Image (cartoon, rainbow, N blue to C red):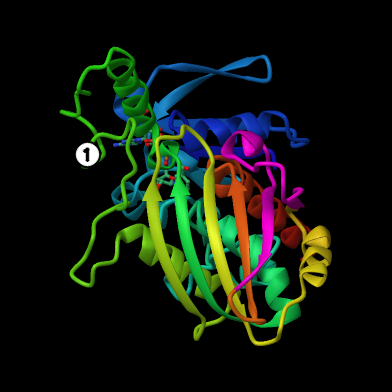
Amino acid sequence: MKRVGIAGATGLVGETLLRLLESSEYEIEDLRLFASQKSAGIMVSFRDQEYEVKELAVDGFQGLEIAFFCLENELAQKFVPAVAKLCPVIDKSSQFRLKDDVPLVVPEVNPGALSGHKNIIANPNCTTIPLVVALNPLHQEFGLKEVFLASYQSVSGAGRAALEQLYYESEFFVLHRQPDTGESPFPVQIVDNVIPQIGAVDESGFSAEEKKTILETKKILGLAELAVNSTCVRVPVTVGHCLAVTCRFEKAVDLAGVRRVLQKAPGVVLKPDREPLTPVVCRQRNEVFVSRVRAGATANDLNLWIVADNLYKGAATNALQIAGLLLKNSEGL
Ligand SMILES: NC(=O)c1ccc[n+]([C@@H]2O[C@H](COP(=O)([O-])OP(=O)(O)OC[C@H]3O[C@@H](n4cnc5c(N)ncnc54)[C@H](OP(=O)(O)O)[C@@H]3O)[C@@H](O)[C@H]2O)c1
């Protein structure tokens, strides 16, 4: 990977991707960074060189080998199809994830979905990714029938403004004052609180995040009939999403067998059940961490606790892994 563009390079995901690229083995000869007009002209350092951030424009991607898009949906809709005429785009937004002709890829789970792509490849939601990385190997062994998910999602999952809001409200909190939420991206205060609603809630009662975790899980696992129940909750943690998961399988599960499967599972780190596995453990790590492996209410049920860095494996790491697969596939042609 020599000629790379990042749209949204000044955001949380874009910055994480840049740092991962910097420490990767790729010899980057042409790096182009894009953001809004407000960031145009900012200089960003990358491997001893300074790069100027430019205002996002389709022409800026001419001649690149790969483009990473780390922008919200409306901007993705406006720019991704046009840039995809110039080079493959790995898109972090949710805009194209459920489209039939767009692969939704987690390299440990469904690398084959990339074949025949039409230059737009979607990177899944930051909660869906760790869920499928942990569940897919168990599905292969025991046959997944139903998933019950409760997620505890950090504020960085909602972007830089959300993270800044938590820091801002924390200053009020330590002074025992009511936080100022006037310009908050959250519907209510986030400090010292838990918000059981991520994204808009529709007439069916589901939040946007819950629908993403349900529909994306089915698409990535290739299990249209899988029953997925999801409750997504925002918690006042800076980085790291946690998932409490109960799974129901076709076959009876034995805990020793589950541990054997998870110990060998690509991208999974199985942690000791009695060591508290918290978001702090997963920060700046590329893997998905699993612990609290417990029996469920019936012989076919299993309980798990899953933790992953939403900016790493939940976003930038996964995008970089997809790029690696794309390069490998194109070399094999
Ligand atoms: N954060 C996560 O954990 C996570 C995980 C998975 C997926 N995602 C998705 O990834 C995408 C990026 O998320 P993020 O957390 O990195 O958001 P963010 O921190 O808010 O960053 C947003 C980026 O978009 C740029 N931008 C805003 N308006 C623009 C415009 N008009 N033209 C060009 N660029 C513009 C910003 O540039 P300026 O700095 O110039 O404003 C910034 O670089 C979103 O679709 C998000 O849903 C995020």
Q: Is mark 1 within 8 Å of ligand 1?
A: no
Quadrant of image for the N terminus: top right
* Lateral position of residue 18 relative to residue 98, left or right: right
Amino acid type at mark 1? Val
Question: Can you say whether 64 is above or below 328 in the image?
Answer: above
Kind of element beneath mark 1: loop
Q: Position of residue 175 (x, y in %)?
A: 29, 12
> Could you say which is closer to the camera, residue 315 or residue 83?
315
Q: Nearer the viewer, residue 34 or 146?
A: 146
- As drawn, the residue found furthest toward the left would be 182
> Which residue position is annotated with label 1?
188
Residue at 74%, 33% in the rendered image: 27
Q: Is residue 198 left or right of residue 250?
A: left
Quadrant in which the C terminus appears: bottom right
Q: Quadrant of ligand 1?
A: top left
Q: Measuring from the top left, give residue 53's x and y in whole percent.
A: 45, 24
Residue 137 lies left or right of residue 184; in this view the side is right
| Residue 84 in view in this figure | no
Q: Total number of numbered labels?
A: 1
